[in-house]
Amino acid sequence: MGSLFRSEEMALCQLFLQSEAAYACVSELGELGLVQFRDLNPDVNAFQRKFVNEVRRCDEMERKLRYLEKEIKKDGIPMLDTGESPEAPQPREMIDLEATFEKLENELREVNQNAEALKRNFLELTELKHILRKTQVFFDEEGGLNHTTESMTRALITDEVRTAGASMGPVQLGFMEKSIEREDYLPCFVAGVISREKLPAFERMLWRACRGNVFLRQAMIESPLEDPTNGDQVYKSVFIIFFQGDQLKTRVKKICEGFRATLYPCPEAPADRREMAMGVMTRIEDLNTVLGQTQDHRHRVLVAAAKNLKNWFVKVRKIKAIYHTLNLFNLDVTQKCLIAECWVPLLDIETIQLALRRGTERSGSSVPPILNRMQTFENPPTYNRTNKFTKAFQALIDAYGVASYREMNPAPYTIITFPFLFAVMFGDLGHGAIMALFGLWMIRKEKGLAAQKTDNEIWNIFFGGRYIIFLMGVFSMYTGLIYNDIFSKSLNIFGSHWHLSYNKSTVWNNKYLQLSPATSDYEGTPYPFGMDPIWQVASSNKIVFQNAYKMKISIIFGVLHMIFGVIMSWHNHTYFRNRLSLLYEFIPQLLFLVVLFFYLVLLMFIKWNRYAATNEFPMTEACAPSILITFIDMVLFKKSKPPGLHCNTYMFAGQSFFQTVFVLIALACIPVMLLGKPIKIMQARKLANEEVQPITGASDAEVGGMSNGGGSHGGGGEHHDEEEMSEIFIHQGIHTIEYVLGSVSHTASYLRLWALSLAHAQLAEVLWSMVLSLGLNKEGWLGGIFLTVVFAFWAVLTVGILVLMEGLSAFLHTLRLHWVEFQSKFYMGHGYAFQPFSFDTIIENGGAVTETE
């Protein structure tokens, strides 16, 4: 029970393990997850530690497993995950695992290399097939190779003549045309395949580099071709280039090489092309058969690996974590014993010893491990036991700061106060039901959703806070019933206690209609639960009535919340035996808060009880004094004025005297908070320096304990032993000013409960009146279609704005009320978290080993 409200008691222990049993013992402790080891070799480089070679072997095995995982995911093969966590293998099993991973990696790499080579051959044959088909079309269009040769030659010569320009005369032109039949002018050609996106630039480069003395034909390959290197689908085109002479041939080939175009041999004779095409098709069919067999073999290898991959990852990460932890230990002089220091929960020492015995038995060692508790003055880590329900609430507290050792833990109280204060701002039965159903769905499906590991940070936040979301929704449904608000409308469950004398048209059309409890319209008895639904039609004074109600309950809840926070500080002071803080901080702080702000709350209840609309003078509503004005006059020692001619100035007899006394008490508390503790510390130091025992009979060590809060390890107390007196006075002055001024600002800060509740209700009403009511006003079958569309739009806005955005806003404001207004009264948050060596945490973090101190 104590660990729920305070962190666990921790002990610093020294552990002696025989070298042969160390691995098995650390493995058992990792499964237990209750020991935080300290690094006893902080000055030793990570590469110079004893088990660095084993850690490197584990890193290499992890690399191979990641390679297998990548290949498995590439093929879309599901990996078997039973959810079970296998035990850490024995050291001798590492050799078998290494051999298995090495064999799988080599086999898979060999298969991949063969498959890549086969795919490359397949790609080349496929491109050659398209070249033979497309070039046949080119030649057929020209009426045969000879005719094509002649026409191409004439085109090229004509281009040469045009390029020569005015320098060539008619005689030369005739000579060139007559020389067409010469053998040295017969054109050559090259054929190949190029990426389609490079083709325009390729054509321009050919034209410019060859000065137009080439003839290019191209045709697109309709289906994409697979790149054997990365598996991408690439669109390509077939081209054929005609040119003359060896010089142009060299130039064309260099351009093709620069654009990474692949050239293929293409026979000139149609019969040779047909014969080559038949051979290509035969080879393609053979390659398809071999590729299929290769892919089947690869798939079988990956399917077999996928069945064990998760377990292999867990085993390797556990081995790596064990050796990483063993690197934190020291070797004794005989090199036969490992020495470790660790923080352990005091209540779990017996459980840890049992785990050490199991590890020793597993290793076959005859030397039992030794666990000795050490005396220390260090602050232990903070360890709060949590379950899946309390874990999220504890995370909210730890986000502000980890509690100091054995300090009061706000998380148990936050389980109730957090969703309730959220619901005060978010009170709507409909919106709360949506939130509660979403949280309930995540709770019911938590096993399946937790198994689906995802990197989506927003979803992980929602899922981690599923119990918070569910409670916030349930509490919002409760406050929605109190406000009688469901999607900005009211529920008439018990029947209204008002009977209006107006006719129906007046009620629906008069925007200035007000409800007055002073008339006979009100029965005189309140609505059984929550607000009367009749206030929904009182458009004139509905907001005034609800504002007065919500504003006052916000102050009431705020003051009670802060007083509860101050009372929590009393538990801290008594536990750490901090008598100075108890006398000179807790008592004046509580008095200051009670005589000013709790008195303000009492005035609200007195006003509600004594004044009513139907009472006779001077107890009528018109004579009710303003509480805010009364409080301001009280602080200023100013006499209040009566609100009316026949009204009383005060609510009860002797109110002026009590108010004066309360203000004087509050003023007297300020110098006590400011000077009481520093003066006592100064007197205690003076007596200690004079070697005179204090009145209480405390020794010098006890004087230090009185000034720093006492308790084991210092805990959550304040340390003043080595602090200068001037710093103590300054620190206490800042603390006093912060508390006195903060009491006012914190009380006003709780008005955000009223402000956000009003904003949420008004947004819901605006969304109803400006969106959904438009669809409800339409009639007929067109009205049904229009209502469906409008309802969908309204539902999206409701979930997106009123549930998500308004919910996030209310969540953040509630978080601020707990962190600043509540926890600042008692919570220091100067501790550091207990991070035990736990296999579950390591596996959850993807194998990352948390560094301990």
Image (cartoon, rainbow, N blue to C red):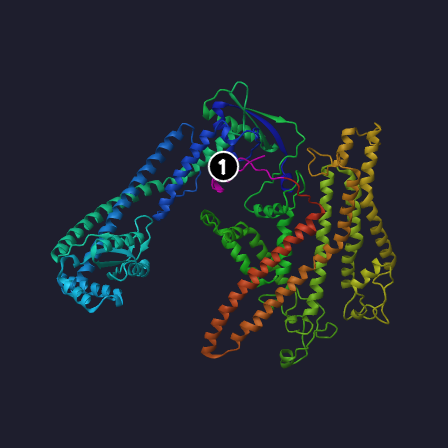
| Front-most of residues 734 and 219 | 219
Residue 515 location (% of width, % of height): 70, 73
**Residue lying at the far top of the rendered structure:** 334
Amino acid type at circle 1 is Phe
Q: Which residue is mark 1?
A: 839
The region drawn magenta spans: 832-853
* Residue 654 image-quadrant placement: bottom right
Could you tell me which residue is drawn at 53 percent across and 66 percent down?
A: 797
Q: Is residue 526 magenta?
A: no
Q: Is residue 837 magenta?
A: yes
**Residue lying at the far left of the rendered structure:** 271
Could you tell me which residue is drawn at 81 percent across and 33 percent down?
A: 685
Residue 283 is at least partly visible in this image: yes
* Residue 177 image-quadrant placement: bottom left
Marker count (numbered): 1
Q: Is residue 822 left or right of residue 392?
A: right
Label 1 element class = helix
